[in-house]
Amino acid sequence: MKKNRWLTMAALAAMCTILFSGMVFAAPIKARVSLCNSPTHPQSIGMQVFKKYVETRTKGNIQVGLYYNSQLGGERESVEQVKNGSLEMATASAGPLTTFNRNFMVLDIPFAFDSYEIAWSVLDGPMGQALLNSSEGIGLKGLAYLENGFRHVTNNVRPIGGPADLKGIKIRTMEAPMHMENFKALGANPTPVPWTELYLTMQQKIVDGQENPLANIWEVKMFEVQKYTSLTGHIYDPMPLVANLKWFNKLPKEYQAIVKEGAIMAQNYSRFVNKAREDAIIAKLTAKGMKVNAVSPAGKQQLRAKSQGVVVAKIKASVDKKFVDSWLAAITAVNKDVNAGF
């Protein structure tokens, strides 16, 4: 009996040791995130909120690593890594994402949104969710839209107030086909240049100008190499946060929920930070010697009339027409609600 009792106790002790060691020494889940901007950019600040929330809610069982300033590669390279599973997560502008999922071209429709609120309403609605979900077929889990902001034009030739002012200007764009089509339609000469080469391109005067949201214009010190900032607001440019789908699906259900909640918190906080600081950026750019001009509603309408229809037609040649029409209908519906009663 004694021998059996000792054997039973030894077996129980061994089982407890195995179970306890599994609980204590299980490696945390890595969630490395590639970010193309600095730690103080709105999307990066949003992702800092994500990191804190996810790590706290999972009690450290998910460890989020944020890699700023394209440490792990440019936007296109980072999304490729997420797609093939060598990286867990990344943010990227819509332009580079269109390489993998052409549906994201709808975000490159120029002059589609008249305000941040209208853009957010569409992105946070059924069509915005449908756009994120459409990447699952290529192995990407779309989680949220981190903020980058409306894109504006800077250059060394003249202020931009309408289509005539863009004629002949050689302008750097992202490596995004529809961005190039937009500026071609407006009479400019678009030249695609990677984000990591932007400042050097301006410094060497390879092109006359470039286009970016205000946060980026300030962050890369365009005031050192450009004279004019024109608030064209030609494209609203969110930065979708994507994860490797297999990695995400392997997470416990409760962790999947936490990651999704953290992504929405990051999205909303990055939006708040970006919008709240834009007036201050304009003041700082002016103080640095840049000439900043708003574009009148009439000027924007002229720009829209020259390029939007051309770009939409190009997009419909590559993307399901019903999806594009549904996207445009969603924008029309929000505008109708905003203007109701006027």
Image (tube, rainbow, N blue to C red):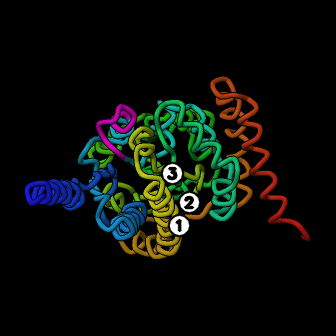
**Mark 3 or 1, which is nearer the eye?**
3
**Front position in the image: 227 or 70:** 70
Which is nearer the N-term, disc 2 or disc 1? 2
For image coordinates 67% across by 38% down, the residue present is: 307
For image coordinates 53% across by 51% down, the residue present is: 237
| Residue beneath disc 1 | 268
Cα distance, mark 2 to mark 1?
23 Å
| Residue beneath disc 3 | 143
For image coordinates 42% across by 34% down, the residue present is: 192
Task: Say which amino acid is labelled 3.
Answer: Leu
Which stretch is magenta?
80-88
Which is nearer the N-term, disc 3 or disc 1? 3
| Percent of width and height locating residue 130 | 65, 43
| Percent of width and height locating residue 247 | 38, 42
Is 248 located above or below residue 309 in the figure? below
Neighbourhood count class around disc 2 (C-alpha, 10 Å): few under 14, some 14–19, many 20 upward: many
Horizontal side of residue 318 vs 64, given as left or right:
right
Neighbourhood count class around disc 3 (C-alpha, 10 Å): few under 14, some 14–19, many 20 upward: many
Number of dots carrying numbers: 3
| Residue beneath disc 2 | 231
Task: Say which amino acid is labelled 2.
Answer: Leu
